[in-house]
Image (spheres, helix red, strand yellow):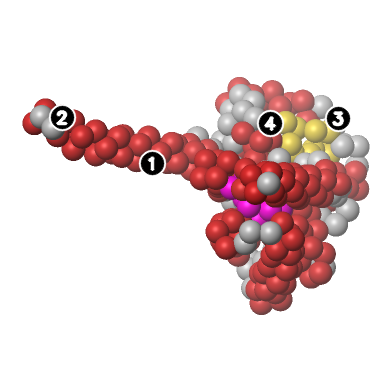
Amino acid sequence: MSQETKKVSFWAPVLQISIMVTVIVSTILTIFAWPVATAAPHKLPIGVSSSDPNVASVLQTNFDETQPGAFKFIDYKSVAEAKRAISHREVYGALILNRKAQVLIASGASPAVAQLLTSISVKLGQQLTQGNGGHQLIFESVDLAPLGTKDPRGAGLSAGSLPLIIAGIVVGILGSMRLKRRAQKFAVAGIAGVAASLSIVAILNLWLGSLQGNYFLEALVVALGISAVALTVMGAAGIAKRAGLLTVIGLFFIAGNPLAAVSMPEEFYPSDLATFGQLLPLGAEVNLLRRISYFPEASTLTLWLTLVGWLAIGAALVYLSGRKTLNKTN
């Protein structure tokens, strides 16, 4: 082997690994940091109820001048209608300008938006005070979906979202490494999913108070999410080996985790990334847990179907990977 050939064989893999790591790290950083760094509301729905029917349009015009496209003000004829819209997750809150000025917030939907609405009500109150010859107008804040007293900042669910997705990935990786039979993979996904969900929800609900809904219903949500991810990981690894494993982990963790709208509402994410994030297991899981805990009147059918759909996809992949192995054996 010539000296030149030795140099090429020495440097080629070194440079390949260096370039691959740089590309991978840069991609992960972009996916995680971009939505946060560029976070700004996009058509954030806010209700308005006033004896003056023009208030919503006036607010829309004023805010479009300073923050184009940031908010979408929706007019409601009564306070009851505005409250119903909040409970159904149609709007994040509402500004009430009737005999009493109120700002209706829902911390359970998003603490960040609740703070934003409170700030808007303070500025609006100052503007109306100046316009009314100095008669001070202060908005009374009413939280229709308050966070628990044990976790008043909602930090538990935000921090707990990472274990939700990691649990399914770990089960999937270990199952793909140690289990050969399809029945074993289905069994471990179900048993591990149920066991982990009972523990996770016990911590978030019974201990930390980050979740406040029905314990067993929330455990079912988490079990579905973990089992769906585990089956999909095992099925992809069985069909496409390392490439399948890395693809699914990249989809669920690297892309799905930052786009799950855990700490920020989906309206704060660029373009259609939020919609994509809600179609992945973690996004649907967290959104569903929030609705069960704080908005029991809101529709949950789409979120349940999303989790069941991923469970079906994972089951199909495991089944197909088993047939592939059987064909090779024969």
Instruction: Residue type at mark 2: give it.
Output: Thr
Report, in whole angstroms, how far the alpha carbon at label 1 lies from the one at label 3. Answer: 52 Å
Give the mark nearer the N terminus: 3 vs 2: 2
- Numbered range of the magenta stretch: 228-237
Front of the two marks 3 and 4? 4
Identity of the residue drawn at 73% across and 64% down = 187
Q: Does the magenta stretch include residue 220?
A: no
Q: What element carries label 2?
A: helix
Instruction: Residue type at mark 4: give it.
Output: Lys
Disc 1 designates what residue? 25
Height in image: 207 above or below 239?
below
Disc 2 designates what residue? 5
Front of the two marks 4 and 1? 1
Task: In the rendered structure, find residue 43 and report the number of the disc placed on it.
Answer: 4
Report, in whole angstroms, how far the alpha carbon at label 4 lies from the one at label 2. Answer: 60 Å
Contact (Cβ within 8 Å) of mark 2 with mark 1: no
In the foreground, 291 or 308: 308
